[in-house]
Amino acid sequence: MALPLPWELWAELPVEKRIFCSVLLFSWAVYLWEAFLAHRQRRVYRTTTHVPWELGQIMDSETFEKSRLYQLDKSTFSFWSGLYSEVEGTLILLCGGIPFLWNVSEKISGRAGFGPEYEIVQSLVFLLLATLFSAVTGLPWSLYNTFVIEEKHGFNQQTLGFFFKDAIKKFVVTQCILLPVTSLLLYIIKIGGDYFFIYAWLFTLVVSLVLVTIYADYIAPLFDKFIPLPEGELKQEIEVMAKSIDFPLTKVYVVEGSKRSSHSNAYFYGFFKNKRIVLFDTLLEDYSALNKEPSEESEDAEDEETKSKVKNKKQGCKNEEVLAVLGHELGHWKLGHTIKNIVISQMNSFLCFFLFAVLIGRKELFAAFGFYETQPTLIGLMIIFQFIFSPYNEVLSFCLTVLSRRFEFQADAFAKELGKAEDLYSALIKLNKDNLGFPVSDWIFSMWHYSHPPLLERLQALKDSKQD
Ligand SMILES: [Zn+2]
């Protein structure tokens, strides 16, 4: 008797088994692809032990070696954490973890009858348990990352107490947003009729606009301290630059990023005529905690939670460089990158809700994940958005990465038009050094992952434009 061929076996499988296997296989395919890229990149870290000649001008060998070891540690860590989460996800699917948790939620919520309101209560319990599970299983990884890896390389500024307080706060705040938003969304899907996907999309659009509006004023301050940038030269220069490009600036803040970690950054936010700029203290030479003398350390109670480590490590940028970095950031605004990103993400969200509406009635999708009798809406959202759309999500995220690199070059060119090419050039070098970025990368790895072009390419582009 001849053995059946693999595709004959495949064709004989019931459709729900085929869906389940495809989801699992695709997830492993993505995992293996990324593991392969990370392996290539680790090889670059391991073998590039000397500063390449084209970098001789911009990076000393001590910094180069430091960043090489840091990136190598990070990459090894993400190998193990990635393997763990892939295996965990697979076991959850294979052992029927989702229907199991759904049944547990049913017992806890004491569902006595049928109807949308019971299902919504049960869904909220399910969501709470699922997020709790993922927070708890993620905790050891996050602890190791912060207190072993970041600590070893001098980036960690948190104490254990601060870390846990922060994690709990984050969990509570997330639930306060997630649970009401989800219950309203489920309700809209239930009562929306044939065109529920339009209302569901409009609802998520409103929610995201509201979140963007309140995030900086009400949510971010729960976690970090924001202080207005004091009057002075830097503030004046920022205002002049904003005015010169018609940026409707209302306030400039400094955020104590150094309490969390010392990676530096800057961003702007706000709608229409009410825009604000936020600078991380680690970006500013004059504010960075690492640059302060021990005697200058403030003595208020908040600061006792932070390790007062002084590493005698000068970091941050000079005022002109900060302005150049801001010139780049404001370039994103002036060139409409922010708006383009919002439009793309909303078009994507509309498309996803539309496809969701097409697919939600398919019982085999639910059966594939162990739901034979009931088709709860929340589970449908999870299955379709997370598992069924995953090939589409991969493609989309790659396209967005490519687009983001384009935007970065354009924003750099904008800063150059403001006459800031030279300052941006030196700021990029300093920021790369402060963050221990490694300037050499495998080409496929960088093409797949880097939302910002590699340092050398950005510097080259600035140099080219400096000459015209
Ligand atoms: Zn940018």
Image (spheres, grey):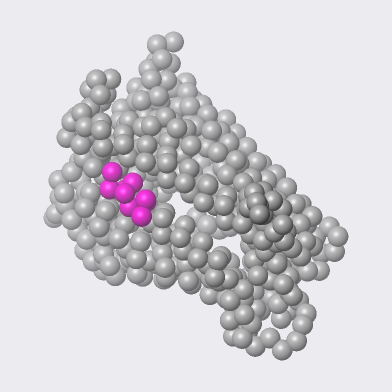
Q: Is residue 117 visible?
A: yes
- On screen, residue 64 versus residue 443, left or right, reads left
- For the N terminus, the image quarter is bottom right
- For the C terminus, the image quarter is top left
Q: Is residue 104 above or below residue 424?
A: below
The span shown in magenta is: 72-80
Residue 325: percent from the left, percent from the top? 40, 34
Q: Is residue 383 above or below residue 351?
A: below
Q: Is residue 41 above or below residue 175?
A: above
As for residue 76 lying within the magenta part, the answer is yes
Q: Residue at x 26, y 53 (%)?
A: 149
Residue 2: percent from the left, percent from the top? 65, 51
Q: Quadrant of residue 20?
A: bottom right
- On screen, residue 202 versus residue 55, left or right, reads right
Q: Nearer the viewer, residue 363 or 188?
A: 363
| Prevailing secondary structure class for the magenta stretch in the rendered image | helix
Direction right: furthest residue: 194
Q: Residue at x 33, y 52 (%)?
A: 77
Residue 188: percent from the left, percent from the top? 76, 66
Q: Residue at x 34, y 22 (%)?
A: 422
Direction top: furthest residue: 468
Residue 339: percent from the left, percent from the top? 62, 39
Q: Quadrant of residue 62?
A: top left
